[in-house]
């Protein structure tokens, strides 16, 4: 039986509260341009807002003027979304805590994830949001996923518990050697 083949994330749709709360957070806090809106075609009593998270894909929000923000943590039961992560540059990452503090938004502080750095905070509806920055740049012709897969193999070979900088450096070296020809044996 053949697999269904994904070609990347198309969009994520979240249940929002009112229209202005969504615009204030997704564009006002996260800087995602508000591209367009239309009715929810399955329920015209709801609005459907479209935002660009920075890569040309979409985050969409169903809004209802009768739903009010509730900042309690969203459900964490089976099938629930734990968090959504968005990529930021290292230069932006270095400013995240200060920028969140300036807005009075509580956050986790900086988290070292071995291959990336992260900060977590909640949106106005209790959804956990992660802003993450990779600590490496893939070599020409490779993706972040290629580097992480190779680093995982190196980590397993070494018997280490999680991916660290040394695994990333070795993975980048291996991937580069596969792609770059040389007349030297060294």
Image (cartoon, rainbow, N blue to C red):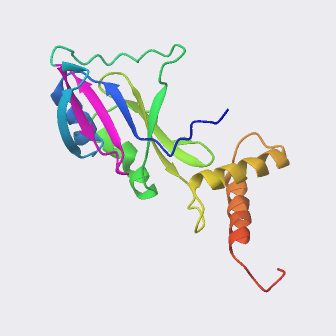
Residue situated in front as seen by the camera: 2 or 138: 2
Q: Is residue 118 left or right of residue 74?
A: right
- Residue drawn at 22 percent across, 29 percent down: 48
The stretch in magenta equals 45-64
Q: Is residue 29 above or below residue 158?
A: above
- Furthest toward the front, the residue is 1
Residue 26 placement: quadrant: top left
Quick check: 34 left or right of 12?
left
> Residue 51: image x %, image y %?
27, 41
- For the point 35% across and 50% down, the residue is 54
Main SS, magenta region, reads strand
Residue 36 position within the rendered picture, expressed as x and y whole percent measured from the top left:
19, 41
Check the picture and name the quadrant holding the N terminus.
top right
Residue drawn at (76%, 39%) of the image: 161
Residue 11 in picture, x, y percent from top left: 38, 38
Residue 125 on the magenta segment: no
Count of picture labels: 0
Q: Residue at x 73, y 61 (%)?
A: 170
| Image position of 148 with respect to 61: above or below | below
In which quadrant of the rendered image does the C terminus lie? bottom right
Give how far across and how far down residue 84 sits, in percent. 44, 33
* Residue 7 or residue 120, whichever sits in front: 7
Indicate the quadrant where residue 137 lies.
bottom right
- Residue nearest the viewer, comparing 86 with 42: 42
Residue 55 part of the magenta-drawn span: yes
Tell which of 153 and 103 is nearer to you: 153
């Amino acid at each position: 039986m053949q697999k269904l083949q994904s070609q990347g994330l198309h969009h994520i749709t979240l249940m929002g509260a009112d229209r202005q709360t969504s615009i204030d957070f997704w564009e006002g806090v996260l800087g995602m341009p508000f591209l367009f809106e239309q009715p929810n075609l399955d329920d015209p009593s709801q609005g459907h807002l479209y935002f660009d998270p920075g890569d040309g894909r979409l985050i969409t929000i169903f809004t209802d003027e009768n739903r009010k923000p509730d900042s309690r943590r969203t459900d964490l039961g089976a099938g629930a979304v734990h968090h959504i992560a968005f990529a930021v540059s290292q230069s932006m990452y270095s400013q995240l805590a200060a920028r969140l503090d300036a807005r009075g938004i509580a956050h986790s502080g900086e988290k070292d994830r071995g291959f990336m750095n992260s900060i977590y905070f909640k949106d106005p509806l209790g959804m956990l949001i992660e802003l993450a920055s990779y600590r490496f740049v893939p070599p020409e012709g490779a993706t972040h996923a290629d580097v992480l897969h190779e680093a995982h193999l190196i980590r397993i070979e070494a018997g280490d518990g999680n991916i660290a900088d040394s695994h990333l450096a070795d993975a980048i070296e291996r991937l580069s050697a596969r792609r770059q020809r040389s007349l030297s044996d060294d």
